[in-house]
Image (spheres, rainbow, N blue to C red):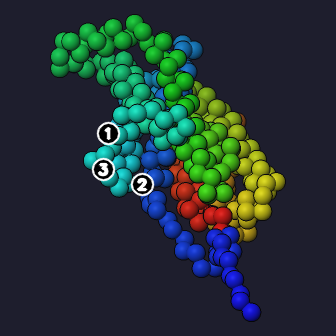
Amino acid sequence: MQELTITSGRNMAHIDPNLSIWGWEIPVYLYLGGLVAGILFFSALYFLRGKSDEMPTVVRVTPLLAPFILGIGLFVLFLDLEYKLHVFRFYTNIRLESPMSWGSWTIGVVFPLSLLWAAIHVTDVFPNWRWPFQWLKRFVLMAQTYARPIAWILILYSVILGMYTGILLSAFNARPIWNTAIMGPLFLASGLSTGLALNLLLSKNKAEKHIIGRVDVMAIGTEIFLIIHMFMGLLASTEIHIKAAELFLGGPYTAFFWIFVVGLGLMLPALLELLEIRGKVGVSKIPALLVLAGGFVLRYIIVEAGQFSQWGL
């Protein structure tokens, strides 16, 4: 009797290698991109609301850091590229069906805008600032007259940047844990929360801190809501998506995710911020540090779990 054996990847989980192509660079890039999105979004938002004097750290101070933070993120991404000399190819065409193309062009807009936005506010933070060239000074003065339109553009592109960091992952259909529409909004909410946390860390104004704390609690609540619905969506989908969700629900990533991301990175800082707002505990930097650390751990563990999650699982 002739026996014909047909094998497929779906039945080879026990022998398929776990290929982790993305290292630490990608989580760092996604984290810094989301952080910059949060910084620029709230800076532009409160500028348009006329809160520049009431919230100087949010509107004027942290935006000065945004170009440097984004520059570090782009450098880290450059380190991850296999063919570094071909980086210019991202800007030789536009592919509407490619999240990477969208991301490249979004960053191509956000980075110069972040530099311009920082330049608009630098003299408010450093009154003795002197521009090295007169033409540059005239250009910044002209930009200040168009600050409101620039702020509206920043709001739009910071939202796109924050969501893109998650959509980039969700577009990989071969990785079930990433293949959810919640990933974009989740990373956006996380980016907004980390942006607020950095402002909370740097602010020295008690009234400003209270406003930031209240908004951050809402951002954290939104993030927890999206995490719950991400797992609900996965558990209501195909068998392979259910198995992907089980990586966090009893699987190898369970303790790490629920303790360090949800517990220490979201719920504990939200509780501390609520207690601070109500005057039950003293104001401290601990909630902000926890949110910043939790935002990075969220991206790190999702990138790692996504590379472990596969259709052969």
Q: Residues within 10 Å of mark 1 (few under 14, many from 20)?
A: few
Q: Is residue 296 left or right of residue 257?
A: left
- Disc 3 on helix, strand or loop? helix
Per the model, the C-alpha gap separating discs 2 and 3 is 14 Å
Distance of label 1 from label 3 (alpha carbons) = 9 Å
Residue hosting label 1: 88
Name the residue that disc number 2 marks.
25
Of the pair 274 and 238, the residue shown nearer to us: 238
- Residue appearing at x 57%, y 14% in the figure: 49
Which residue corresponds to mark 3?
Answer: 84
Residue 141: mark in rendering:
none
The residue under the point 49% across, 23% down is 154
Residue type at mark 3 is Lys
Of all residues, the one furthest to the front in this rendering is 1
**Is residue 106 or residue 189 the one in the foreground?**
106
**Residue 107 placement (x, y as % from top left):** 43, 34
- Counting from the top left corner in percent of width and height, residue 243 is at 73, 65
Q: Is residue 54 left or right of residue 81?
A: right
Which quadrant of the figure contains the N terminus?
bottom right
Q: From the top left corner, tell me how far across and down residue 289 is, in percent.
A: 52, 48
Can residue 58 be spotted in the picture?
no
For the C terminus, the image quarter is bottom right
Q: Amino acid at mark 1?
A: Phe
